[in-house]
Image (cartoon, rainbow, N blue to C red):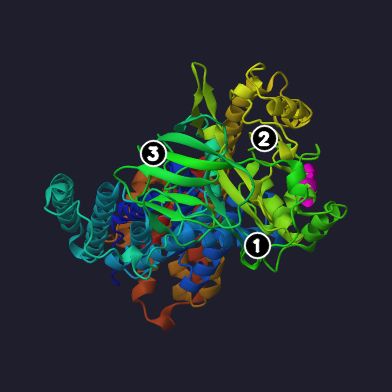
Amino acid sequence: MSVRRTQASLRLPAEVALVAVSVAALVGFRRLFVDWSFLVQPLCLLVVSHVVAGVLRARRVPLVVAAVISTVIGAVLLSWVFYQHTLRFGLPTPTTLSAVGTDLRAALDLFRDVKAPAEVMRGFVFATAASFWAAAFLADWAAFRLDAAVEATVPAGGLFVFAALFGADGLRLQLTLVFGFSCLVFVLLHRSARQEVGMPWVRGDARRGSRAYVRGGAVLASVGVLVGLAIAPLVPGAESTGLVNWKEIGARQGTRITVSPLVDIQSRLVNQRDNVAFTVRSERRAYWRLTALDSFDGTVWRSSQRFSRVENELPAVTGAAGRTEPVVQDFTIRDLSQIWLPAAFQPKDIEIDGVLVRWESSTSTLIVDKDTSNGLEYSVVSELPDVDADQLAGAPATVPEAIRDQYLGLPAEISPRVIELAQGITAGAGGAYEQAIALQDFFRSGEFTYSTDVQKGHSDDRLVDFLFTGKIGYCEQYAGAYAAMARAVGLPARVAVGFTPGDVDPDDPTLYTVLGKHAHAWPEVYINGYGWVLFEPTPGRGAPNAGYTGVGEEQDPDSTSPATDGETATTETSVTTSAAASSSDGLDDAFPEGGTASGAAAPASQDSRGSRAAATLGWIVLVVVGAAALYGGVVLGGGAALRGWRRRRAVTPRQQIDLAWDEAVDSVRVLGIMAQPSETPTEFADRAVRRGRLTGEGLDELARMTTEARYAPTEALVPEVATEAGRTSTAVLDAVRERTTLGQRLGYRLSPKAMVGRLRSR
C-alpha cells in the first residue's frame, strides 16, 4: 500500500502565524505616517492576499498561474478600494491607470523630500497596500510551496526594514519586538507542522511531540521578548546617536531638504482645527509666514535651498525696496511640530537661545537645526512693506535675470488650457501689478468655492479639474493654481505657506493665538522695485495691511480680529472691511447649511470627518464582502473545474476506480467522517457505515474494489469494474445528500476543513 503524507494539525495555525508576520510588518509602517489612518485599507487587502494565495495553493494551482491570478485579483481590488470612481463595470479603465500613475509620481516626488512621519496621502497608502499584497503572496509561496520557514519571513521583513530605515524613531523598540516575536512564532509552528508531516507512521506521538515543542518554544520566545523589552533600553548606549548617521551620507554641507508644508495644511484645517500651533505678541497683525516654495514640477510645489547658520542679524534680501515699518514679534511655539520658525515677512533680525538657527535668504525662511520647533521662544524683527496700488502699478516691467531663471519655470507637460486661460484673463492688463490683480479677481469672482473636503494636491490633472470642472478647493489649490498661471504669463511667482493672524486676546489686543485652522497658503509675485508682494486668491481670506489687493482682512470665520471691532480699526481697515463684505458669496458657498459663517464652520468639519469615517467603513464592508465572494467563487468554481479535470485524466480502469473512491470519501466528509491516513479503505468503510448509517449504499463494496484494484495486475482490471465503482460512488453521494441540508453541504465545501481533507486524499 502506498504511504500518503499526513496533513499537519498545525498547518492552519502556521498559516495564521504567517498572516500575523505580515500584519506586524504593516503595523511597523506607522513610523512612516503621522497617524494610524493609513492602516485600514492595506490591512484588509493584505489579509485577502493571504486568503487568495492559500486557496490557490490548496487547489493545487500551478505557481505561475497562481501568480497571474493573484496579480489580477490584486489589481481589481486595489482599484475598487482606491479608485472606485474611475471603474467601469467594476473593472479598471485607462482613467484608473492614469490616476494611479499621478498619485505614485506625487508620492515618489514627496518621498524624495519627506522626512517621516509624513501625511497620509493616497499615493503612499496605495503603494503600501500593493507592496504588502505582493509580499503576502511571496511569503505564502515560500512557506507552503517550498517549505522554507525563514525565507517566508523575508518579504515582510524587507518591508519592515524599509520602514525602520526611513521611519521616525517613535515606537522603534516596541514595533521591532512585535515583529520579531511574530516571526519566531511562525517559524516554530511551521517547523512543528513539518515534523508532523514527516512522521506518518507514528502520527499520534508526532503530534504530541510537536505540541510539546510548540509549548516550550512559545514560552522561550515570550520570555525572550519580555526580557528584551525590559533590558534593551538599559543597555549602555541604547539611546545614543549612531556613530555614523547614514541618512546624512551624501548630503551637501549646509543644505537641508525640507518637505513641502502644503502636505500639512489640510490636516490642520480639518483634523487639527483647534490645536494651538503658537502664540505671538505683535503691535501689527500679519500673515505669519513659514517659507516659500519656488519649484513646481507638475505634481507638487516645493523648495530645496541652501541654508546657512545665522546668529542675530539676518543677511539682507535682494530685490526689496519701498517704504517698510519695523515690527517686533515675540513667538512661543506650542504644537507647530515642524522645523520652520514663523515670522512676518520680511524678517531682519532674530533672538533665540539654546538652538541653532539656519536662514535661506532667497525665500526668507528660518528653520531650526532639530526635528521640531515645539517649545521654543524667540523674538523677530521684521520690516513690513508699506506700499499702495498706485506705487505697484507704476513699477518698472523689467525683472532681474536671477529672478526670471528661478521663478518662471513650468513643467513641459502642463496643460495648454491652463496657459490659454491665464493669457486670456490678463490680456487687458497693462503691467505686472494689473496682471496679478486680474488673476486674483478671477478666483474671487464667485465662480469658485472654498472647501476643505477635497483631495489634497495640485498636480497637472488636479489643476485642470480645479480650474475647469470642480472649481472647489482650499488655499492649497488656489495658491498653487495662481502661481502656475502667473508664471504662464511671465510673472515670477511662488507659493508662500504659513498662518493667518489668529485669534486676538480680548484682554490684550497685541497677543494672538494661532490655531491649526489658521494654516494658510498664498501666492507671492515679484514686482520690480518692491520685491515679493503677496496676493490673495482664496475666497473668504484676506491679508492684513494689504489694501493694494482690494481685499479686506479676513480669516477663518470662527476667528476674532480687531479689524471687526469698529472703532479700533484704522481708516484703511475700515475701507477694506467693507470690501470683504462684498465677497460674502464665497462664504455662503463654503458654508451652505445657512446661518452665520461662524456657526456653520464646526458642523461642516464634523460632517466631513463623519463622511470620511462612513466611507472608510463602507470600504471595509466592501472588501470583506468582496473577499467572501471571491473566496466562494474560487473554492466552488475551482472545485468543479478540478473534478472535471481529474475525471478527464482518469482513463485507465485503476485510475477510474481510485477516482470513484476519492469522490466517495470526499462526500462522506460532509457527515464529519474523515479518513485517517493509517486506515485501509476497508477499515474506513466499516467506520463510515457504522457512524453514517450508510448501510446498503455499497461503500464497503467500493472499498473492496479499490483494494483489489491497487494490488491486482493491470491486465486483470476490466472496464466493467470501473463502471460499477462509479455507480457505487454516485449512490454514496446520493445517500449523503439525503442525510444533509444544502446549507450543510455548502458550508462544508467552503470550509478550510474541506480543503484539508481533499489535500489528504490527493
Could you tell whether 225 is left or right of 256 in the image?
A: left
Q: Is residue 392 above or below residue 759?
A: above
The tag earlier along the polypeptide, 1 or 2, is 1
Q: How many marks?
A: 3
Point out the frontmost of discs 3 and 1.
Answer: 3
Task: Tell me the element at label 2.
Answer: loop
Residue 640 in sight? no
Q: What span is in magenta?
A: 435-442
Q: Residues within 10 Å of mark 1 (few under 14, many from 20)?
A: some
Q: Is most of the magenta stretch helix, strand or loop?
A: helix
In percent of width and height, residue 357 lies at 37, 50
Residue beneath disc 1: 97
Residue beneath disc 2: 541
Of 608 and 113, nearer the camera is: 113
Q: Is residue 234 above or below residue 708?
A: above
Alpha carbons under labels 2 and 3: distance apart: 28 Å
For badge 3, the amino acid type reads Tyr
Residue beneath disc 3: 378
Alpha carbons under labels 1 and 2: distance apart: 36 Å
In percent of width and height, residue 727 lies at 53, 61
Q: Residue furthest front?
A: 323
Of 147 and 607, nearer the camera is: 607
Alpha carbons under labels 3 and 1: distance apart: 49 Å
Q: Is residue 657 above or below residue 208?
A: below
- Identified at 74% across, 37% down, the residue is 449
For badge 1, the amino acid type reads Leu
Q: Residues within 10 Å of mark 3 (few under 14, many from 20)?
A: some
